[in-house]
Amino acid sequence: MRHYGFDLDEKKLPAHIAIIMDGNGRWAQERSFERAKGHEKGYETLKRIIDFNKKIGVKTISVYAFSTENWQRPQKEVSFLMQLAVNLVQEYTDTLIRNNIRLLITGTDDNVEAGLLSLLKEAMKRTEHCDFYTLNIAFNYGGRREIVDACKKIVVAYKGREKDLRNFSEGDFENNLYQAGLPDVDLMIRSGGEMRISNFLLWQSVYAELWFTKKFWPDFTAKDFCRAIYQYQGRKRRFGGL
Ligand code: FPP
């Protein structure tokens, strides 16, 4: 298939793309807007990419919407991001269902207001049957925290039968992450010019191809999305082999 001048090989699509949507704040500051305006624009960009993926058909897209570190931001900005999450589930779940897109919200419940948590859970439940592709929103998420939380579950589950741990595999470990069955990340995209992973999907990204752009997230386009996939398809992946 050809999109925006890029010939994309349908048989070599990444199974899972993870996106770090960075640069909202700087986008706003460059225009002398409040940072919130950048997040609002970033939310619009997110919806455009979700919609565009109907044409491409990547089976899982994860986006980093709020990290466990983001609580350290000014209260006003935190509240704005919480409100965006409310908006997302209240105004967008019907669209997801119409497009057969399953919604997952991944992260810890800690510190999130009970009302918001139940909205998020309800939206997930409503899209449970959708199977065209999965949109996984990392919200109040930290990669290390996810691994620690998995360890805690395992300790509880194996209490009194520690000898069974002898056969415990990486697959068994994965089953204790927030979302069992999430495929490994093939391609990680980060906008905003920084070249780091910032605690996003650590376990799942061990062999991810990394793709960076200096563009701020509000300026990120469907064409950039295609460019990232096209360049990913041109890379040689050896997974530690030859
Ligand atoms: C990083 O940019 C972005 C975020 C912390 C939030 C991303 C959120 C969205 C794109 C909107 C959708 C959100 C929800 C909750 C549904 P930054 O603020 O760190 O930018 P900067 O590095 O330029 O300051």
Image (cartoon, rainbow, N blue to C red):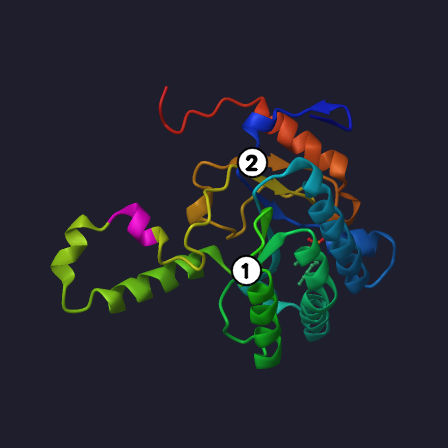
Q: Residue furthest left?
A: 163
The mark lying in front, picked from 1 and 2, is 1
How many other residues sit within 10 Å of disc 1, few (<14), some (14-19) or many (≥20)? Answer: some
Relative to 10, is 140 above or below? below
Say which residue appears at 77% left-offset and 40% top-offset. Answer: 221
Q: Secondary structure at mark 2?
A: strand
Q: Could you tell me how many numbered marks the image carries? A: 2
Relative placement, left or right, of 14 versus 48 is left
Relative vertical location of residue 22 with respect to residue 154 in this rendering, above or below: above
The magenta stretch is 169-173
Q: Looking at the picture, how far across and down is residue 196, in whole percent?
A: 56, 44
The residue singled out by tag 1 in the image is: 128
The amino acid type, in three-letter code, at marker 2 is Leu
User: Dot 1: what SS?
Assistant: loop
Magenta span: helix, strand or loop, mainly? helix
Q: Amino acid at mark 1?
A: Glu
Task: Please report the residue visible at 26 percent of the width from the left and 47 percent of the height from the top.
Answer: 169
- Locate residue 80, reporting x and y percent: 73, 70
* Left or right, 171 with reference to 56: left
Question: Separation of disc 1 and disc 2 at Cα?
Answer: 30 Å
Q: Is residue 171 magenta-colored?
A: yes
Quadrant where the C terminus is found in the figure: top left
Residue 31: x and y in percent read 87, 54
Say which residue appears at 42% left-offset and 24% top-offset.
Answer: 238
Instruction: Quadrant for the N terminus, please.
Output: top right
What residue is at 73 percent from the left and 47 percent from the top? 51
Among numbered discs 1 and 2, the one appearing first in the sequence: 1
Name the residue carrying label 2.
Answer: 210
Please identify the quarter of the rendering in which residue 40 is found: bottom right
Q: Is residue 137 left or right of residue 158?
A: right
